[in-house]
Structure formats: structure tokens, C-alpha cells
Image (spheres, rainbow, N blue to C red):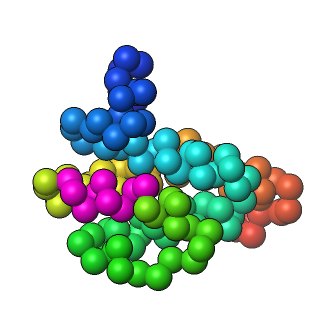
Amino acid sequence: MPYIKQERRKAVEGGDIKNVGELNYYITMKILGYVKEKGESYATWCDAFSVLEMARIRPMDAKIFDYPDRLHELSNSILPVLHLWPNTCEALATIAMVEQEFYRRRIGPYESRKAEENGDVFT
């Protein structure tokens, strides 16, 4: 979970990551920054999650993929941290937890707003 102690947040944002909770926080903050910069949209969420998916599918080789220019900063800030994490299973589990929490807190409500605005396709 990304809910680490307030006093650790600045250090973690600077790359001083000591455990998987802090790894989760670091990735979460990078994605939140990307979405804030680009604006919340379906395309922005897909961009952010494509970086995580490539890290999950091929955790050690993800850095060789040719990301679109718009994703270089995000991928270059997240992937090296994941590649250097000493336990691949922890890194992969953290990716899954980041995705689940984003869906619960941000993407689900976004989709609900869009369904209300544009009409639900599941009715």
C-alpha cells in the first residue's frame, strides 16, 4: 500500500526506498504526477499502466522496449527502480497492488463518471 508515514515521503520521493510499501508509494507518486501533468483521460491511464504492464510481463527486459516519447520520463523513473529491487516477486506483487489501488481509488470512479456522462454500455 502507498500509505507510508508522512516523515518518510520526501526521502522516498528522492529515491530512498527501504521496503515494498515505500516502493508502492514511489510508483504511485510517479503515476499521479504523470496523470496530473497530462490530464486525466482514458489515454493517460493506459499510458501509465502500459509502463507497469511491460515491467510485469518482462521485469528484467522491460527497459529494452521502445516506449513512445511521451512515456520516456515515466518509464525511466519507474523501471530502473523495479529492475534494481532485490526481490523480483516483491516487485511484481507491488505492481499488482499499485494497479489495484489505482483502479479502486481513481479509475473506477473515473469510469463511473464517464458512464453517467455518456451512457452505460452494460445496461
Residue at 35% across, 23% down: 8
Task: Point out the stretch of residues depicted in magenta.
Answer: 77-85
Residue 33 drawn at (x, y percent): 59, 45
Horizontal relation, residue 36 to residue 12: left or right: right
Vertical arrangement, residue 40 with respect to residue 26, above or below:
below
Residue 122 drawn at (x, y percent): 70, 67
Horizontal relation, residue 91 to residue 104: left or right: left
Q: In which quarter of the image is residue 2?
A: top left
Quarter of the picture containing the N terminus is top left
Q: Quadrant of residue 4?
A: top left
Horizontal relation, residue 26 to residue 37: left or right: left
Quarter of the picture containing the C terminus is bottom right
**In the depicted view, which residue is nearer to us: 57 or 7?**
7
Q: Is the magenta stretch mostly helix, strand or loop?
A: helix
Q: Can the viewer see residue 86 in this picture?
A: yes
**In the depicted view, which residue is nearer to us: 100 or 54?**
54
Residue 60 drawn at (x, y percent): 23, 72
The residue furthest top is: 7
Asked if residue 60 lies in the magenta stretch, the reply is no
